Image (tube, helix red, strand yellow):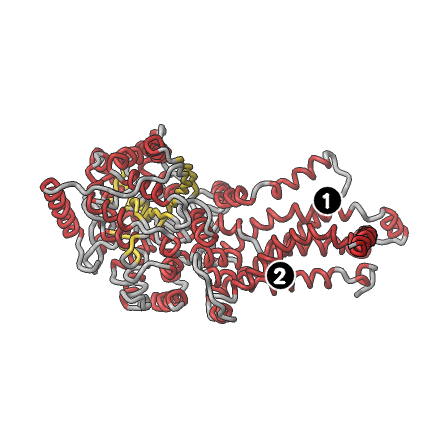
Amino acid sequence: MSGITRRGVLGAGAAAGLGLVGSRQAVAAPSWNGPAPEPGAQIRVLRWKQFIQAEYDSFVANTKKFSEKTGVKIRVDAESWDDIRPKSAVAANVGAGPDIIFGTLDDPFKFPDKLIDLTDLAEYLGEKYGGWYPVARKYGMKDKRWIALPHGATGGTLNYRISAMRAAGFDEFPKDLPGYLKLCQGLKKIGKPPGFALGHATGDANGWTQWCLWAHGGRTVDDNNNVVIDAPETVAALEYAQQLYATYIDGVLSWLDPSNNKAFLADQISLTFNGISIYVVAKNSPEPALKAIAADMDHANMPIGPVGHPTEQQNILNTYVYSFTKYPNACREYLRFMWEKEQVDVWETASGGYVAPPLPAWNDNPIWTADPKTTPFRDVLKFAQDDGYSGSLGYASAATMGDFVVVDMFAEACTGNQTPKAAAARAAERVKRYYQI
Amino acid sequence: MTVQVQTVVRARPARRRETARLWDNRNFLGLLFMLPAALILGVFLAYPLGLGFWLGLTDTLIGQPGRFIGLKNFISLAHDTVFWLVVFNTTLYTIVASVFKFVLGLYLALLLNRRLPFKAMLRAIVLLPFVVPTVLSAIAFWWIYDPQFSILSWSLVKMGVIHHFIDFLGDPWNARWSVIAANVWRGIPFVAITMLAGLQTIPPSLYEAATLDGASALQKFRFVTLPMLSPIIAVAMTFSVLMTFADFQLIYAITRGGPINATHLMATLSFERAITGGHLGEGAAIADAMVPFLLGAVLFSYFGLQRRRWQQGSRD
């Protein structure tokens, strides 16, 4: 990932997209020749619980359409992300449960041998829709085999109040770290502080702390999974975070994922890291106060640090099929159907920009441009890095994130509980326990 | 041929007699009647417990069979600073919460044992915190302790007692006391109602005799109530300590173990390492490490609080 710039990625993506479109028109669109679903197939799907009802309804409508077309019966259950993780693990362990899981992040990398090979399908989709973004490829492939299909990401961006940013002396959102720190200090000064979760908030706390670590060139492990978090780059990231923390609203150390939504919508903070949910809630609310917040807020991608390229961490939605399924062909065909643009367009529109695309050709949906405030969410997977960056995904990366090692390291340093150097050393000890198994 | 037939004919009544005798055998019948319960206990209690112990001695990852690694998980945990912090948190949480639950629960039981108007209704109300699902009460406490929206902080600010909202869950020590308070609130009804049941079994004649002997209220409590109640206290506190030590839901819903692992308990850490992190072996080892503490608590309650002589009013 090093050496990649946002502009570079955009340019390359556009060029690749144009090239692909051109070449496809000249040659032929890739066709799918997978086997037909098994007769009488019945599939159980477990997916993440919806935050936006219209998104879920659209997902179910697409599923129903598939059932009507193929005769495959599908039951869809929904659970919260945190509950899907243990359930997917149990299903893998006991060899029974849902056939397909629409889950998150590196879960499939914990039991890759229990999943069916999706290589043919992933390659077909990649070829048809402009090639998977690098981070999507990383979350889908184990060695040279696709074990999962990324469905997108519930993108996180910086949510900010436009009026507060202007009052703090900025006409547009800063794109570098010094400017960003200055903005945070300005917001604190005008009494509209930023607020970023530093408790055990899976999405929000990991989102901004991993970004900060990576932006300064820090990493938990190197390309060969050697633990390298106890490094000057990490210390620099922690020192920078200490300055940011000084500007935050009180209490962020206890914040879980919903805390910043509440604080932003209550006009207590003017800047935070979150998905599009704050904006959607404010925009669709009948309350004038919330509508005013929606009108006064916007989104920005995370600033770029000394490494010179985007370093965002995103909540990837990852889908996988267990090898214990009796109907592997039906499962593959169902996934293909759901990933085809005809269905995706309907689903993306209903979700109102909640799920960022993993494939460039999904980007032309008007939902991403009709309201410019949603556009930053569209591109998050272009700029994201994977959780185990820059090592491989698997048990160790999942455990390191699950144990909140990076979040705790930032919390220790920010609060003065440990010096940045000591916090980095303590984190290294914790990470080593996982990577040395 | 004839001989064989005769043998068979003779054997049948003999076998029947033996079977009939077996059905009359108290020991056999006792064993037979206990079998379903033993099977249930074996399948749902002993087997998972045994499996948990075994997993703790392996390097099992989710979805992959592990190999036997002896005590490596425990040795690794012994060098894990987070594990020792969590042991400290769990011990503090259990001791402080149990003491408060005992004192307040007993006090509440004594109050409810008096002649009060609307006694039945009051007793039902006391049970409410215990009846509400833990997750719901945890979410309520999460709001009560919220750094921005806390009703407690808001009230104190409005009354002019404080000027800034209290950071209940953001400061490690504040967070520890806050979750302990939530646990105490939730656990008091169980202790109170159990103690109340015990109080009602104490014969009034004992109090009458003590009154005739000129005993003060405190002496009646010390030499009649407490000794007579001690078997109930032993049972109630054993259960209370076990439930507090193995608490999971309250912590998971309010803090997820934060801030900086200050409220992580052994049960939450075990879940986090085993399920979220995928290291079933290590998670099981943490759960196994709870057993000596739990056994210690049970033995203390059993031997410490059930001393016969003490119950009979002797000094020991």
Say whether marks 1 and 2 touch (CB < 8 Å): no
Dot 2, how many residues are within 10 Å of its Cα: few (below 14), some (14-19), or many (20+)? some
In the displayed structure, would residue B235 be above or below residue A226? above
Could you tell me residue B107's position as x and y percent? 70, 49
Residue B45 seen anywhere in this rendered image of the structure:
yes
Could you tell me residue A202's position as x and y percent? 39, 51
As measured in the structure, the alpha-carbon distance from the residue carrying label 1 to the one carrying label 2 is 31 Å
Which image quadrant is residue B130 in?
A: top right
Could you tell me residue A423's position as x and y percent? 37, 65
Type of the residue with mark 1: Leu
Mark 1, residue position: B111
Q: Nearer the viewer, residue B306 or B104?
A: B306
Mark 2, residue position: B294
Q: Which mark is residue A275?
A: none
Q: Secondary structure at mark 2?
A: helix
Q: Residue at x 32, y 45 (%)?
A: A274
